[in-house]
Image (cartoon, rainbow, N blue to C red):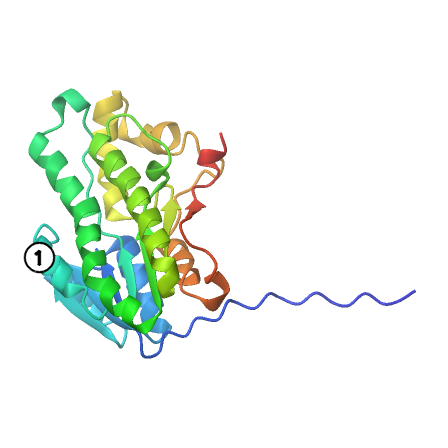
Amino acid sequence: MTPRTPLTAPTAPELDLGGRTALVTGAASGIGRACALRLAAAGAKVRAVDRDAAGLEALAGEAAGIEPYVLDLTDLDAAEAAAAGTDVLVNNAGIQLVRPIEEFPPEVFHTVLTVMLEAPFRLLRGALPHMYGQGWGRVVNVSSVHGLRASAYKSAYVAAKHGLEGLSKTAALEGAAHGVTSNCVNPGYVRTPLVEQQVADQAAAHGIPEERVLAEVMLQDSAIKRLIEPSEVAEAVAYLCTPQASFMTGTSLVLDGGWSAH
């Protein structure tokens, strides 16, 4: 009987971004922070964009190659200018408000759509000429399971994420001939300040105590009953920049614990 060859652990996909410039929005905390650290570890110079100056300074102190770039993404002209010369663009910044549609403040709806959909469009406008000129680029849009499914009381967030999915697919179709891929990463609930601050809002909206929100509302449709960690999302973002992912474009990489399997 022929002895069985021992199994070996799989090798991680190669990711060498030496000489590349990556721009990550919402980089001061949560998913953006994890993405900035992961891409810097791969050798990229990371332009870390956020309006939180103190958070960016703390981030820059954690790794070499991270350049703090204080910017409010509602300044759309400045956002487009910030993306010039970018090889990897990670559209991650997000804001959230949980309210019924009839109570949702119109000015907040407008701000959510500006930050989470119009700003990514303007960042793409700023980044694509350089990417096209060199015949290589990676666009990763941090979407959400809410880019594929809706939840009550999140009209602005769901609308913005659904729009981001369409923008990403359009960028994929236009960029393919230029060596540029564009994809979405779609996590479920991530352990971030954005999710933690929703607990009280969800408790009020559903009329239940805060301690019941995670199990009965946020993770009700998830087969895996835990929050996903920012580092797990960052690893998916990094994978989309590897040579092994060069044929992936115009798609959504879902990390939702089985939510959308229903």
Q: Between residues 82 and 228, which one lies in front from this camera angle?
A: 82
Image position, residue 113 (x, y; %): 17, 40
Q: Is residue 29 left or right of residue 229?
A: left
Whether residue 215 is visible here, answered yes or no, is yes
- Name the image quarter holding the N terminus: bottom right
* Vertical placement of residue 46 versus 103, above or below: below
Residue extending furthest right? 1
What residue is at 14 percent from the left and 66 percent from the top?
69
Q: Is residue 136 left or right of residue 160?
A: right
What residue is at 28 percent from the left and 71 percent from the top?
133
Image position, residue 245 (x, y; %): 47, 61
Residue extending furthest bottom? 19
Image position, residue 197 (x, y; %): 22, 40
Callout 1, which amino acid?
Answer: Asp
Query: How many labels, in total?
Result: 1
* Vertical placement of residue 89 versus 258, above or below: below
Whether residue 21 is visible here, answered yes or no, is no
Dot 1 corresponds to which residue? 77
Image position, residue 33 (x, y; %): 27, 60
What residue is at 40 percent from the left and 47 percent from the top?
228
Q: Is residue 130 left or right of residue 136?
A: left
What residue is at 12 percent from the left and 53 percent from the top?
73
Q: For mark 1, give the secondary structure.
A: helix
Determine crowd level at label 1: few under 14, some 14-19, many 20+ residues with C-alpha closer than 10 A.
few
Q: Between residues 225 and 187, which one lies in front from this camera angle?
A: 187
* Vertical placement of residue 181 versus 133, above or below: above
Q: Quadrant of residue 102?
A: top left
